[in-house]
Amino acid sequence: MPPTQFLAGAASTKLKGPMRLKTLALNPYLHMAVLTVIVAALFGRTLGSFFLADDFGEVAYVSRIAGGDLGMLWANFSGNYMQISSMSVWRPWLLISLLTDFIIWGAKPFGYYLTNLVFYLAVCLSLYWFVRSLCRDWCKTRGSLAAFFAALIFAVNPLHCESVSWVVGRVDIICAFFYLTCLNLFILSLEAENQRRKKLTILSVVSFWLAMWTKEMAIGAPVLAMAISLLWGRQALDLKKSLRLCTPLLLSTVVYFILRYLALGTLLGGYTQGIGDAQAAGALGHWLDGDSARRLFIPLAYSIYGSNHIFQTILALLYTVLGTVVLIRALSLTLPLRWLLFWPLWLVTALAPIYKLWGLGYELEGARFVFFATMPLAAFFPIMLFAPQASAATARSLAQTLYRRAVATITLIGLSGLALVYLKVAHHLNLEWVHAGKEVREFSEKAIQLAGGATEGDIIVLGIPKRRGGAHMVLNGTTFKIMLSRPFVDETLPVERLITFDPIIFGNADYINARRFKDCLARPRTRAVLWDSQKRQFTNLSPEPSTGTVPQLVLPTSVPPIFLHTMGHAQLENADGKPAISHITAGDGVAFANLNFSPLDADIAEVSLTCLEAPIDRPLTLGCCWNEQDADGQNYVNSDFLSDAPSPQKVYLRLSQNYRWFTQDKIKTIFLTLPAQTKLTIQSVRLLKASEVCPQLSLLISGAPVKSTSPIGVIPVSSSSNLQVKVSLPQALQQGNLLLEISKPNAFFENFSRADQAQMVRAIQKTTAAPESIFILPKLPAGANYQIRARVTNGDHQYGEPSDPLVLRME
C-alpha cells in the first residue's frame, strides 16, 4: 500500500454515526493536534525560564560571532565545537541554531526556549509518522493507535525535562528531529519512483548530515535505514537492493568520519581530559548499576518523590500488566516478527554512542544522554500490543473475540495510565527546571547589584546555586563571571572584585580551597557573602576572628548523649580510659558540645582509632558534621579508611574544605559519625590547623614569588615561564618522601577517588622530605588548567594530608 493511502483522514463523507466518529478518532491530523496541545501544556512554563549553566558560555560565544568575528564561526566547521579543550566534538549545526536565536532574540531566553519547544514538538510528530509508516500494512485502527501512543508516551516522558528546559539541552532534540526526518524521508523513498526517489534520497542525506553536525547520536541512522529496507522494502530481505538504496547514507557516513578526523584528529571524541577520565573511570560501574536502568523506567527524582512513592508502585504495576500481555502474545506467537528484529537494533544504536555517558543519578541527572533511547522504549508496548494477531478473515469463536477485546481494553487502559503518570511526573520535574531558571534570574539580578556596588575592596561570593534537584543552575565560577558580562549585562561591571571558590570546570560544589579563602578574607576591606536560596538574597558572613587557639576535644566515656541515632543502638565500653564502641548502626556517632570557637581556628579533625571488627565487603567511612546534623548532608565531610591498617591509624576529616564551615559565626557542636557494623576504639580526636599536617605551596617564576590569582582562583602564567614550586613542611611531615603531583590537563584532584587519582596524575617529582624544597616544573602545554599539590608518603602510607592545590592556567 503506498504511504499516502494510509495517511488519509476521514476519507468518506458518507460515513454515519459511530463509523464517522471512529474515522475521526483515527485521523492523523487530530492525533498531531492532541500531541501539540499536550506538549504545549506540559512545557509551556519553560518559556518563562532563564539561562542555566552552560547556556551562558554558549550564548556569550555566539554573541561574538554576531558581533562580527566570523572566524569563530568557521572554526566550528573546521575544528572542535567552541574550541572547548575538555571536549572533542564536531557540532557546527548546533552552533548555527544558537547563533540564529541570538540574531533574532539577543540575550532573551524566551526565544531560545521557544526554539527548544518547537523542535521538541517536531520530534514527537516525526516519531508519530515514523511508527505509523512502519505499521502501514496493519489495519488503520491498530497502526494509528500504535503510532499515537508511542508518540504520546515519548512526549510526556519525565526524562525529557533536561533537554527541553535547558537551552543547551536542545542538542539531542535538534539531532533527533533531523535523525527521524532522515529515516522518514528514506521510508518515503522506498515507495517512490525515479526522480522523486532521488530527491527524497538527497533530502534524507542532507538531514543525516544536519543530525550528525548537531550531535553524534544519529550515527545509527544508516544502520536502521538498511534494516528498514530489508524488512519493509518492496522486496523483503533483498540485501543487494537494500545496499544500493542505502549507499548514499553509507557513503555519507564514511565521508563524515574522514572530515571529522581532519577536523578533530580523532574518530570517537566526546569528553576528554579530566571530565573524560572521570567518565571512563566510572563507565563500567554505571552500566552494571541496576538503579540507573530502573530509573529509565521509573523516572522519579528522589528529592521530589523519595524512595517509596505511590507512583513507583503504580508504574511497576502498569509495567507488570503490559509486560504480561506481551508475554502472552509472545507465547501465542502473535508478536510482529519484523518489529522483533528491528526494535532491538533501534535500541542498541541509540545506546551505543553513550557507552561512556550511561547513567542516571538519583535526581535523574544526565537524562539527556538517554533521549534517543526513550524513542524505542516509548514505542515498545504500543507496537507489541497493537500489532495484528491474525487475519481479519479468520473465523473467531466467542472466546477468541472476548480474549481480543480484553487484550484491547487492558492495552488501552495500561498505556493511558502510563501516559497519565508520566505526564504528572514530568509536570513536577519540569517545574523544578522552571523554578531553577527563576532563581538563577534573581541570583543574576542580585549579583549584578552586588558587583555594581563593589566600589572598594573585594567581595567573596559563596553558595553560588548549582542545582535544584536534578535541574542545573550556575555551573561554576567561570559561568558566574560570564553571567555578569556582555551580552547579559548592558554595562561593564567590576567583576574582578567578586572572588569565587567554585570548581573551575566541574567538581564537588561544596569543595573550597580553605587556605585561599582565609588569605582572601584577611585582605583589607574584603567581605564575604552567601547566597540564601530560601530568601533569594545575599547575606553577609561574619565568622568570629581567629583567636589563634585550637580548641581541645574531650572524648566522653558514657553513652548519653554522645550517640546521634535516636534508637541508641551503639554500645560503649571503657577500655583503659578510651571509648570502645560496638553494635554501631547508621547514624551512630560521638557528639562534642559546648565548643564555641571560630571556624577560622581549625581546618581538620584528626581521629586516631583502632578498628577491632569490620565488614570486608565495603570500605569504612568516618563522617563529620557540625552545629546541627544536616539531613541532606550539606554540612558534612567524610573520609575513607582501611580496617586492616596498622593500629592505631589516623583519619583526617578536612572540615574547612566544605564552604559551609565558614558560614557559621561560631562552631558550637561537632558530630563524628561512625561506620555501621563496625567495632572500634577511639584513641583521640583533635582539631588541627592545616599548617600542622599539610604541606604549604607557593609558586615562583624565575625565583620570584607569585601571589596574584584570578578571581576564580587560577594563576595565569606563560607556558614559556621558568616555573618553580616551593614546598614548606611542618615538623610532623619531615619524614619519608615528598611528592609533587601535577594533574593531566583540566583534571582536578577532588574529582577522583584516591584509587582513581593515579590515572590523572601527569607527572610526579620526588625528593626526600625536608623543611623546604624547590621543584622545577616541567614545560606544560598551553591552553589548559593544571593542578599541583604536594604530599608526604612512605610506601603506601601517607603522612598527614595533601596540600591545598595550586591551579595554573597555561597561556
Image (cartoon, grey):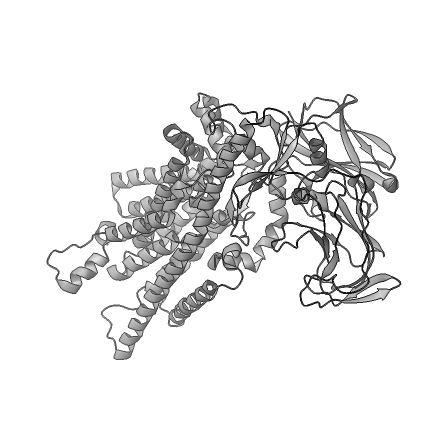
Residue 130 lies left or right of residue 678; in this view the side is left
Q: Is 374 or 532 nearer to us in this picture? A: 532
Quadrant location, the N terminus: bottom left
Residue 244 can be seen, yes or no: no
Q: In which quadrant of the rendered view does residue 398 lie?
A: bottom left
Q: Is 811 or 714 nearer to us in this picture? A: 714
**547 over 32 or under it: above or below:** above
The residue sitting at 42% across, 33% down in the picture is 98
Residue 37 can be seen, yes or no: yes
x, y (%) of residue 682? 82, 58
x, y (%) of residue 55? 48, 36
x, y (%) of residue 482? 53, 30
**51 over 647 or under it: above or below:** above
Quadrant location, the C terminus: top right
Q: Is 670 or 8 nearer to us in this picture? A: 670
**777 over 236 or under it: above or below:** above
The residue sitting at 78% across, 44% down in the picture is 801
Please count the marks in the image: 0
